[in-house]
Image: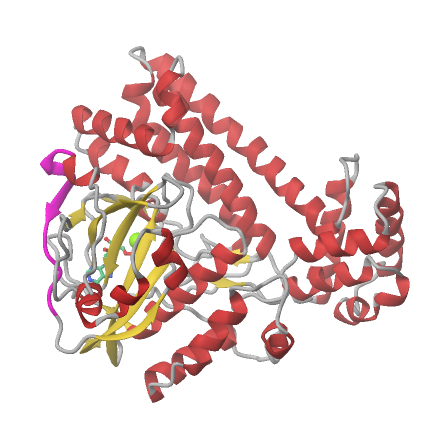
Amino acid sequence: MTLRFPFDNSYARLPAGFFARVNPTPVAGPRLVKINRELARDLGLDPDALASPEGVEILAGQRVPEGAEPLAAAYSGHQFGHFSPQLGDGRAILLGEVVNRSGARRDIQLKGSGLTPFSRGGDGRAALGPVLREYLVSEAMAALGVPTTRALAAVTTGEPVLREEVLPGAVLTRVASSHIRVGTFQFFASRRNLEGLRQLADHVIERHDPEARMAPRPYRALLDGVIGRQAELIAQWLLLGFIHGVMNTDNMSVSGETIDYGPCAFMDAYDPATVFSSIDRNGRYAYGNQPGIAQWNLARLAECLLPLLADDQDEAVAQAQDALDRFVDLFNDAYLRGLRRKLGLAGDQEGDLALAQDLLGLMAEARADFTLTFRKLADAAAGPTHDGELRALLSGATALDAWLARWRTRLASGGRDPAEAAGAMQLANPAVIPRNHLVEAMIEAAVERQDYGPFEEMLEAVTRPFDPRPDHASYADAPPRSDVPYRTFCGT
Ligand code: AMP
Ligand code: MG
């Protein structure tokens, strides 16, 4: 069996300053954990060949496949508001790009594959826990319909990695429509490398905004494209209770995909100030701050693009400002559209936003589970005899009856019959998300006991979020009440 990757590597054709050519570092004892067979087929790869010893050697970095041009990309980034001029792929290596079955270009990247010229003080490696977490959560996000990088494979390396403790090492094969970040633009802009900046912008237009080429102002159209995608993405995060946790500019993809699943987590009890990441001490990346942070990051992108937006500086600034101002409207539109779907509201009516916000207010008051409340609301759409579980979740919230009456009046005015509304709401409100306590238990089983059963089963459950199998019902449960707040760590 031979494994052939149909590589066509456009990033490797960019000038030398964009990256460092570097091969993955071989590991002691590679072992396959998981292949994403469906994704493999979509990429034109034979899943059996990928799972063969030769395939596993490639996924672990023992062997470079034919046609690959391995490289580590250079980028900069604002980390928690502070600019680092020299970041880059410190533990990731791009093997190359393939064109998938739908004709879309996809990066194939190994994460945890050894040192690169951008590793700085790091070891270039990844631990098994964060690799399984990224595999599971990114695949859950894809199943939830959120733009995201994907997981093609996970392997263990047979080598320990040293974090606060000694942990098993692993490599994740990540697939993305590109790995170009706001920080990639910052890399060239901060070096005043106008030629590089223009080449990068042209590359991104080619890849993500081909229609911008024909626009009167192609680079403005590029900026508009990135802003529009981010507005949609952040709205989807909020509608699902997702907290990215480390929205540094080097972790914001210009493709509009969710990228970098280090300290991310889904909110359980609704509270807009929720923060999980242990290093986010000031709550910069709290759930409710995400739209504002996205706009801040996009302002950094717009600053980078100033020299391309117009020859006249004032005109360039006006263009950038106009583009950024639109973010708020685009985000609000996407968010309200999503809220209407979550509440089952057909058509657009005045007062829909207030109706949704009042429900969120009740949820905050009752510290109700975000995901379960919306799911039980879907049940309640079938009629007042179906709202017992919703009432239990929101018990203690004042004015619940008044809210339910308003909602029912609004539902009826949309012209859908109750069963239809309930069905539509079930497709907008997942039953199953990757619950934090279950993610931790899954990681513990794999790391402490080499038991991948919980990973396999949980992956099945979270990739069918709207229509859970009866035997997966427990994956929908909220966590047991705990006095210890959940904490995540930057999965390095
Ligand atoms: P992150 O916050 O995970 O996006 O990482 C920020 C920067 O640190 C990126 O440039 C990473 O490549 C780099 N980095 C993170 N972990 C490691 C590691 N274990 N070894 C080398 N570089 C790393
Ligand atoms: Mg990153």
Front residue of 462/279: it is 462
Please determine whether, in this image, residue 417 is positioned above or below residue 454: above
Q: Quadrant of ligand 1?
A: bottom left
Please determine whether, in this image, residue 239 is positioned above or below residue 267: above
Front residue of 255/100: it is 100
x and y, in percent, of residue 321 in the image = 44, 23
Q: Is residue 136 visible?
A: yes
Q: Residue at x 58, y 74 (%)?
A: 475
Tell me the colour scheme of the image.
Answer: secondary structure
- Magenta-drawn stretch contains 290: no
The stretch of residues the image draws in magenta is 14-26
- Magenta-drawn stretch contains 20: yes
Q: Is residue 108 left or right of residue 301?
A: left
User: What is the residue that sits farthest to the front in this orientation?
Assistant: 1
Pick the quarter of the image with the N terminus: bottom left
Q: Is residue 345 left or right of residue 103?
A: right
x and y, in percent, of residue 280 in the image = 41, 60
x and y, in percent, of residue 143 in the image = 51, 57
Q: Residue at x 47, y 70 (%)?
A: 459
User: What is the residue that sits farthest to the bottom in this orientation?
Assistant: 449
x and y, in percent, of residue 431 in the image = 64, 65
Q: Residue at x 35, y 20 (%)?
A: 213
User: In which image quadrant can residue 348 be found?
Assistant: top right
Q: Is residue 486 left or right of residue 406?
A: left
Q: Is residue 279 visible?
A: no
Q: Is residue 434 left or right of residue 107?
A: right
Q: Residue at x 26, y 79 (%)?
A: 167
